[in-house]
Amino acid sequence: MEQEQNQVNVKKWRWGINRWWVLLFIVLSIITSRIFPPVQPHIQIAAEHLSKSPILNTPLLGEVYFTNTMVAMFIVDLILIGIVFSVNRAVKSGKLVPSGISGALEAMLEVIYNLTESTAGKWARTIFPFFAIITLTVLITNWMELIPGVDNIGILHESDEGHPIGEIAPGIWTVLPGEPEGQGYQIIPFIRVTSTDLNFTIALALVSVIMTQIIGVRAVGPAYFKKYWNTSTFFKKPVFGLIDFAVGLLELISEFAKILSFSFRLFGNIFAGTVMLFIIGTLIPVMAQSAFLGLEFFVGLIQAIVFGMLTMVFMAMATQSHGSHDDEGH
């Protein structure tokens, strides 16, 4: 018993001994920030295309270029495929309780499925895949902004609003603070978080809203469209019929509003978080940025859950019949 207590005491963090490591990292971060002072990066809403690279100097299709957010999306896809193979291997191993990534993913999916089943009932199996894949995709995409090198390693290109550059190692250059004597340089990053690209968020919103309509038609049939164009009581009960008709038009407008809401909520939160990390990186030492990285960790998690859960709730609502309760409501 005494030996186990001693082992616990040895493993426990002791500030009196380990504080020097913390102080060392703080001092080193301050020194390195003085040697290589941070430069405020160029911030723009549109994704940067990598046409400055000699390999990718031609458009993919018409005026569509290979952008840095596409690179990030391919990386997210590879991570998702890797997770699938990891889970498949864990299932084939015969273990009753998976461990590691497979165990964490199983726990997460179990929570998502139980939540879907309690909301959508018999339609849970249809709605669950959309809830799960949207949540996982947005979660991994958002968390990419926490990876070192994202948004700050890329291609140097000349710019009127650029900065001077300096070589820190053979073949490795960095942008320096200050005004250039002639033409300045900026960095086009190889990887930029896909959630900061409106093309991605709008596409994801369109998938969510369109699949909601398809599931609604499957569940209710053609009567589903009475939700948007209800004239069944227009002549029988003119007052209530006019109200039903107006409510249907509002429902139709709300479907388009969902696209805007989904798109700009995710884009705005993640883009603002990225800009905040840029600005904080130019103001305080590296060690002090950890608190803001932790904040963005939770922001990315919350946005993924919100996007996935709202999709699930709207799909569950679409499976419910609206026409059978009109007379009871009146």
Image (cartoon, helix red, strand yellow):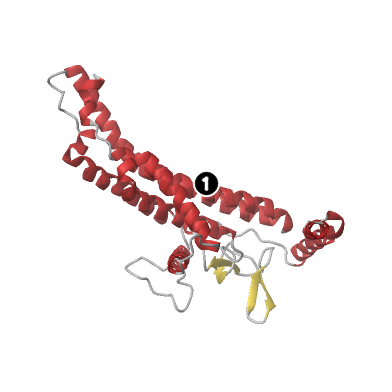
From the top left corner, tell me how far across and down residue 215 is, in percent: 27, 46
Residue 327 as seen in the image, left or right of residue 120: left
Residue 170 as seen in the image, left or right of residue 263: right
Q: Examine the image and state in which quarter residue 245 appears.
A: top left
Q: Is residue 117 above or below residue 9?
A: above
Q: Residues within 10 Å of mark 1 (few under 14, many from 20)?
A: some
From the top left corner, tell me how far across and down residue 71 is, in percent: 46, 67
| Residue farthest right in this picture | 16
Q: Is residue 56 above or below residue 244?
A: below
Q: Examine the image and state in which quarter residue 220 appears.
A: top left
Q: Which residue occupies 76% across, 66% down?
A: 32
Quadrant where the N terminus is found in the figure: bottom right
From the top left corner, tell me how far across and down residue 191 is, in percent: 52, 66
Q: Is residue 220 above or below residue 90?
A: above
Q: Which residue occupies 30% across, 43% down?
A: 122
In this view, the residue in front, 6 or 189, is 6
Q: Which residue occupies 79% across, 64% down?
A: 28
Q: Is residue 282 visible?
A: yes
Q: Amino acid at mark 1?
A: Ile
| Residue farthest left in this picture | 235
Q: Is residue 20 above or below residue 169?
A: above
Element under disc 1: helix
Q: Which residue is mark 1?
A: 302
In this view, the residue in front, 305 or 126, is 126
Q: Which residue occupies 63% across, 70% down?
A: 182
